Amino acid sequence: MPDRRQFLGTLAVAGVATVAKTSILNASPSGPQPPAVPSQQKWDLRWLEDVKAKQHKQVFDMGVTDVNGVSPLHFPLFWLNAQHEVYGSTEAQLGAVIGIAGNAFPINFQDAIWAKYPLGEKWKVMDASTSAAAKRNVYADPAATGMAAQWTVTALQKRGVIFWMCNNALTIISGMMADATKQTHDAVYNEFKAGLLAGVKLVPSHTMMLTACQEHGCAYQRV
């Protein structure tokens, strides 16, 4: 197994978890090793065939947690609504996929992960109800009102939108959090994996999945 410095350096060059670049470069090479991912691990990507069958389909390469003070999740919402307005499309005819990695990392996690780890501080996500760094997932707020209630993760999932989490980003950032909290990498990786919001799909590589979605007919939008 490559040492930690080689592992993190390789993935950093590949472009995952850019928000963590400084921390990665400063990480101790003698720290905990990343959890091993068996080469024979099977990834369930059958959902790509369901997306391919849709009449209109788009993958959103989500790279931010904020767009001028507004959740970036408004982009897929407006895409869905416009498809209905222009083409009269039904939900069953639409395929929207949101790829999460790097700078958008916190969007996919349950409140317990936000409360335990400084996601709000590290990613500069504010909670309007407290005027402080978020300690809960404001992107999945069940109490959201108005239009904001329509672009929560849960609301979009109910309309058939698929969210994924890049396993490379999960590996890197859980390693950083393990170093910061003096825990084993395996423990934090498994905690983060279990702490994904219901329905979020863990995929082997963000960049690989962007290609796969486009090969299955998706248009592409960088957010």
Image (cartoon, rainbow, N blue to C red):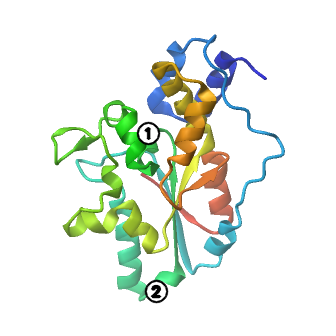
Mark 2 or mark 1: whose residue is earlier in sequence: 2
Q: Is residue 220 above or below residue 130?
A: below
Quadrant of residue 126 in the image?
top left
Give the residue at x 56% y 27%: 175
Quadrant of residue 46 in the image?
bottom right
Amino acid type at circle 2 is Thr
Give the residue at x 42% y 51%: 223
Give the residue at x 79% y 39%: 38
Instruction: Give 170 or 197, whichever is nearer the viewer.
Output: 197
Give the residue at x 64% y 16%: 5
Check disc 1: other Cα within 10 Å, few if <14, some if 14-19, many if 20+. many
Instruction: Give 130 or 7, whichever is nearer the viewer.
Output: 130
Instruction: Give 17 or 138, whichever is nearer the viewer.
Output: 138
- Dot 2 falls on a residue whose secondary structure is loop
Image marks 2 and 1: residues in contact by CB distance under 8 Å: no
- Dot 1 falls on a residue whose secondary structure is helix
User: Is 38 on the left or on the right of 195, as rendered?
Assistant: right
Direction bottom: furthest residue = 88
Marking on residue 90: 2
Q: Residue under label 1, please give it.
A: 103
How much space separates mark 2 and mark 1, taking CA atoms?
32 Å
Instruction: Give 148 or 112, whichever is nearer the viewer.
Output: 112
At which x and y percent is residue 202? 61, 51
Does the image show residue 76? no
Amino acid type at circle 1 is Asn
Q: Is residue 185 above or below residue 4?
A: below
Q: Is residue 33 above or below residue 209?
A: above
At which x and y percent is residue 13? 61, 28
